[in-house]
Image: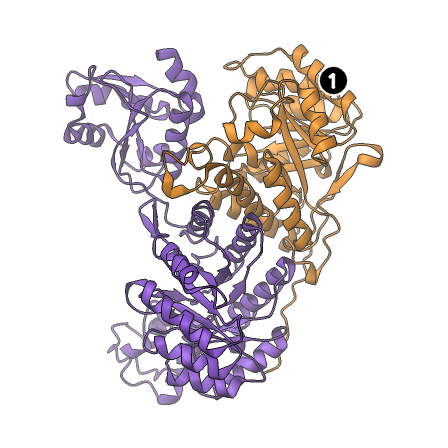
Chain colours: A purple, B orange
Amino acid sequence: MALSGIEIFKLLPKTNCKKCGHPTCLAFAMKLAQRQASLEACPDVSEEAKKILGEASAPPVRPVTFGTGDKAVKLGEETVLFRHDKKFVNPCAFAIEVKDTLSDDEVSNLCGQVVNSEIDRVGQKLRIDAIMITNASGDAGRLEAAAKVVAAKAPGVPVIIYTENPQAAEAAIRLFADKRPILYGADASNAEAMAAIAKNNKAILGVVANGLNELSDLTEKVKGLGVEDMVIDSGARKAKDIIANNTLIRRAATKKNFKPLGYPIINFMQRPDSLYETLLAGIGVTKYASIVVMSSIEKWKNLALFTLRQNIYTDPQVPMQVEQKIYNIGEPKPESPFMITTNFSLTYFIVSGEIENSKVPCRLAVMDCEGLSVLTAWAAGKFTATKIAQFITDSGIEKEMANKELILPGYVAILSGSIEDKLPGWKVTVGPREANALPAFLKTRN
Amino acid sequence: MAFTPTRETYSGKVYPVTVGTGDSAITFGGENVLPFNSFEGSTPNRPLVAFEIQDVPPSDWPENVQKPFAGVSDDPVKWAKYCQDELKAKAIALRLIGTHPDRENRSPEDAVKTVKDVLAAIHIPLIILGSNHAEKDSSVLIAAAEAAKDRNCIIGKAQEANYKTIAAAAMANNHKLIAMSELDINLSKQLNILITQMGFDKERVITDPMCSALGYGLEYTYSVMERIRLAALTQNDVTMQQPMLGDVGMYVWKIKETTASEADLPQWGASEERGIAWEAETATALLVAGAELLIMRHPRAVEAVEKIIEELI
């Protein structure tokens, strides 16, 4: 558990030497407790204090980097149970299972789908993050052959090798030795051999046990064997058990700082029905999974899951923003209506959605107000007549328009006169206060 | 190291709400733990999913969700019976969208006839929803609540602007009431207090903190629901212990992801599957956040959500 400022203070030299940049040791201790300072700033701290504070300040869920290069995925580092308390840190990774019983062509085809899975949504690039190669054949040679296809066809994509057989594991994991792969399948019976392989190949070890008690014992054992980077599987496969175990793991880690369960969670969500698998994976995204493994890739499914992950991992303190520009909705003509709003993503989505529903082609100017909604941005002095006039002038939009008319959100009707003063030749019309009145408003104008 | 699970015991619980009458009556809510955390408490009832129908043909719904109701959706009675008998719906949500002044502007008398006809045709519980026009809903829902007297329906939605008339109508005719506020835990609490101050039984209210679709503010609804549920359980706040509604279908089936064709956006994949997944995924996320009552449209989305509820309970 994190130490309080006073507990930390007791471990400091108490000399108030100011070398750390803080006026007193107590002030420094308070900053440390809030994780706003680093212990390295103190030159005189004892080794013993370093050890105690180092352990206490480590994130409750161990950070693990899976893969290397620009496709590497950061896992863990989570600190809370609920996203309204603090932003969830590292988004859940999506992995697709490729069984080694498939033909090389089928494996190659799946690799192609993973490589091409990237979509852009609200400025973020989202994709299937990893491939899990499963030793379903039970044959070591077959696993290695499938792994070779993956290494060639999906270069750079982080890989999980799934086998309980150390011989098969060794041959396949070697192909990814310097790529930070996950070797999944270590249990109580093979932990020594699997840990040795993981260590030799700098792999992360995926450990699986039957329940949280056995899992805690197993991670301690593996740690004792010299492997510190793990992902953990409680053995839960049913939705109810996945929620229960993931919740208990996250609670133990974040509330009790229980180190044996302070690792990223891997959940296996493969189901024959792709829609159902989507929902199950969604439960993993919302409830504490760091990796969910699925059996199929469909574009509609990826889009739904990527969006959910983006929603859940959004910082609740920082509003989502869209890019400042003039958006065409439908195919606007020179005489089509021209509206303005702010760049809070929800505002944009709702306003553009209602315009689409109206079926009236429009231009919508979205102005950067640091992600605030219309009324808040106006109150904060970010959505003012001067700034609006500047934005409209700079955009050069008037060249594309037949009538210089700007439709203003009803909530800022008060600005209409001053905008007209600052935009000579323009007419400012006050639109509805709420977006849901836009279809009726636009239809009456037509 | 031996692992001792951290079990939470909560001081509060969610009120159970029963809707409908006789053998078809159904109870939802009633749990004393966070959603699906039945390892440390009791979840006596499963969440209820209601099929949404409306008083006018669904010409405003996207093609992919009109299709499953082709041939029945021209008549709310046929539509309701189809949901009950063929789709095995456990409840129906009748939205009187045709009463909206910008739509068909149907009268309260028209609404009464629709409600009576639908109630005569079904035995499962009915949720009666206005058109979300605060002023018109007052007159429409007063008439509709009276027409449904003693059938133990859910009437909604009461909002800050019209809660007095709608709550009075629900109270006079023995119905449950949906109280809706806009994505803010404090507004939600305040509305519940205002409604109970009128003498309305707090255990007959269902809270609608306002739904949002996946990708369109879902995280706001999700977190408001989580916070309401935590207030109910950990602080034993009696003004926040109502079961919660996710009015999913209406918010999902108007966004681009459920309406755009695959020809326009090939990178988004098959449009029908995409729409169904969008509705089902939105619903599942809200279940995990704490919704006990869902209003949905597409039969395949409902089927998948019912299946996941089965596995979660």
Please state the horizontal and vertical placement of residue B303, each as a whole percent of the image: 64, 42
Tell me what residue is drawn at x 19 percent, y 31 percent: A391
Q: Is residue B304 left or right of residue B176?
A: left
Task: Give the vertical position of A238 relative to A206 (above or below).
Answer: above
Q: Secondary structure at mark 1?
A: helix
Q: Quadrant of the C terminus of chain A?
A: top left
Image quadrant where residue B299 sits: top right
Image quadrant where residue B262 sits: top left
Task: Give the vertical position of A88 relative to B135 (above or below).
Answer: below
Task: Give the vertical position of B213 relative to B284 (above or below).
Answer: above
Tell me what residue is drawn at x 65 percent, y 48 percent: B307
Amino acid bearing label 1: Asp
Please state the horizontal and vertical placement of residue B13, each as a whole percent of the image: 70, 51
Q: Nearer the viewer, residue A405 or A18?
A: A405
Q: Is residue B207 left or right of residue B218?
A: right
Tell me what residue is drawn at x 62 percent, y 40 percent: B302
Please state the horizontal and vertical placement of residue B75, each as a whole percent of the image: 66, 18
Using the image, name the chain to which the residue with label 1 belongs: B
Q: Nearer the viewer, residue B109 or A234?
A: A234
Q: Find the residue positioned furthest to the right.
A: B22
Crowding near pointer 1: few (<14 within 10 Å), some, many (20+)?
some
Please state the horizontal and vertical placement of residue B251, each as a whole percent of the image: 51, 33
Q: How many marks?
A: 1
Q: Nearer the viewer, residue A380 or A322?
A: A322
Q: Is residue B18 left or right of residue A284?
A: right
The residue under label 1 is: B117
Image quadrant where residue A68 sits: bottom left
